[in-house]
Image: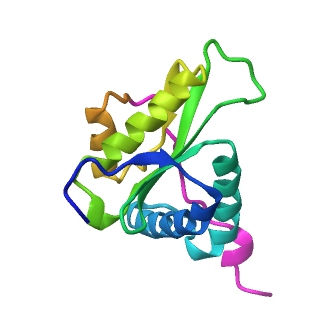
Amino acid sequence: MSTDNAMPVEPATVADIDAIADCWVALAADQQQHGSRLQAEPNRTSATETIARHVVTDGVYVAREDGICGFVMFHVDAGTYSQTEPTGTITTLYVRPPARNKGLGTRLLAAAEQALADRGAATVSIEALTANEAAREFYDRRGYDPHRIELRKRIENDTHSKDDP
């Protein structure tokens, strides 16, 4: 990977879908160290379908140099409820480890933010796992403030813990 920050960030094509899915699987596997319950490889098909939908609606940008080095996936929320202002959501931002710390994540994020603004979004949201300090610091340095917190509790299911009679 070059250290040149001129690596282009551009809309993904249908031909990129499988390579982006490979990145998604790597991201999902990596996130398990931060407490993610999402399985990586077993979700490849679902992730590939989601990526394909975003590609055809121009909601995935990639950076490439000898293959996909990183990607960002995003959309303007079109939910069930009316909102006070349009909100964009960045669902995934990933940079392969060899391409990290070269400004590529920042450029992918900026490209998605600009695309969302061009589509009418007034705010942008993104999620990061609480235990992923590096991701939270990355977004904090780029002006993202905590907005919502998910609370989680492990419960015991009596039907699985009792001995059979």
Q: Please tell me how many numbered marks the rendered image carries.
A: 0
Residue nearest the viewer, comparing 112 with 80: 112
Q: Position of residue 48 (x, y in %)?
A: 66, 64
Q: In this rendering, does residue 148 appear at all?
A: no
Q: Please, is residue 132 above or below residue 86 in the view?
A: below
Q: Which residues are magenta?
A: 146-165
Q: Quadrant of the C terminus?
A: bottom right
The stretch drawn in magenta includes residue 30: no
Q: Position of residue 35 (x, y in %)?
A: 44, 61
Q: Residue furthest top?
A: 84
Q: Which residue occupies 53% across, 62% down?
A: 20
Q: Residue furthest left?
A: 3
State left or right for residue 80 relative to residue 26. right
Q: In this rendering, does residue 131 appear at all?
A: yes
Q: Please, is residue 119 above or below residue 18 in the view?
A: above
Q: Which residue occupies 34% across, 53% down?
A: 132
- Which image quadrant for residue 142? top left
| Predominant SS of the magenta segment | loop
- Which image quadrant for residue 13? bottom right
Residue nearest the viewer, comparing 149 with 19: 19
Q: Which residue occupies 41% across, 67% down?
A: 30
Q: Position of residue 62 (x, y in %)?
A: 47, 52
Q: How is the image coloured?
A: rainbow
Q: Quadrant of the N terminus?
A: bottom left
Q: Which residue occupies 72% across, 29% down?
A: 78
State left or right for residue 22 relative to residue 53. left
Residue nearest the viewer, comparing 97 with 138: 97
Q: Position of residue 127 (x, y in %)?
A: 48, 42
The stretch drawn in magenta includes residue 161: yes
